[in-house]
Image: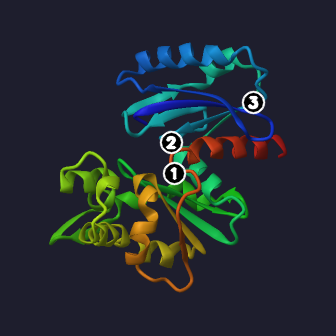
Amino acid sequence: GTKTLIALFSKRGRVIRRTKFKTAQGYKSFIQDLEANLVRFRSRRIKAVTVAIPGVVQENYSVKFGNRNWQNIDLYDLINKLFDCPIWFENDANLAALYEGYRLPGRTVFLTFSTGIGGGITEKNRILAESNGFEPGHRIYEYGGVSKEWEDIAAASAIESAYHVDLATSLRKKPQLQDIAKRMSLGLPDIVQQYHPDTIVLGGPMGRIFRLIAPYLPLEPSVKYRKPKRPNESVIYGCYIYAKQKEHE
């Protein structure tokens, strides 16, 4: 998305090294930055690479970045040139859902309230097929007498814009929390009705103030709300789990 994070995991799932850089606006600049940072990991014996994409992974390994409007971007050849190992691509929200739903009983829906609202659906430690078409942020709801997409009402960016603050996590007064919970709650009943989750994990910046929002969320007798285990690192840990699963397939 706005940043690119590279993390090196040990065989047992410990982060050994990480580096982060701002994602360039232009694709050619991004590729140059990515290659320059990946080269630093070549001294390690890499067994697998998982690439988390903020967009659509296509059959020919090309990538469509939704937030940059980049079409048919070939990242596979670049990575394959640097590392002699299996390379896997998956949507970033799906990978975050894989980690946050890992070892939870039943079905889990993961929602990230960030620049937009994304998410994934998992069950029995696997990403479900329904997750690939899961775009909750684009559902239309009415708020304040105006019909908008859910992410234009409840994403962290929308809440920050409404309150004229830099970080939604700075809003901690009761009326503010009630309003945030009301915005977030608009789409939850539809998700429960359609996907029948046992657990809904609320991630992104809103996940960092989960305990403050939780008392104002709508009661769903069959669903448990949870805060994310790693609000800022769900995706990279999902990458690790995904690579381990692919290794044993």
Q: Are marks 1 and 3 in contact (CB under 8 Å)?
A: no
The percent position of residue 144, horizontal first and vertical second, equals: 17, 70
Q: Quadrant of the N terminus?
A: top left
Q: Which residue of the protein is positioned furthest toward the left in this rendering?
A: 145
Residue for badge 3:
86
Task: Return the disc, 1 or 3, that comes first in the chain's sequence.
Answer: 3
Task: Return the disc, 1 or 2, that comes first in the chain's sequence.
Answer: 2
Which is closer to the viewer, label 1 or label 3?
1
What distance separates the C-alpha of mark 2 from that of mark 3? 19 Å
The percent position of residue 58, horizontal first and vertical second, equals: 56, 38
Which residue does the image show at 80% across and 40% down from the upper left?
Answer: 12
Q: Which residue of the protein is positioned furthest toward the right in this rendering?
A: 248
Q: Which residue of the protein is positioned furthest toward the front in this rendering?
A: 173
Total labels drawn = 3
Q: Nearer the viewer, residue 216 or 3?
A: 216
Residue for badge 1:
231
Instruction: Give the numbered dot on residue 56.
Output: 2
The percent position of residue 218, horizontal first and vertical second, equals: 41, 80
Horizontal side, residue 124 vs residue 162: left or right = right
Which is closer to the viewer, label 2 or label 3?
3
> What SS does tag 3 mark?
loop
Horizontal side, residue 31 vs residue 106: left or right = left
What distance separates the C-alpha of mark 1 from that of mark 2? 23 Å
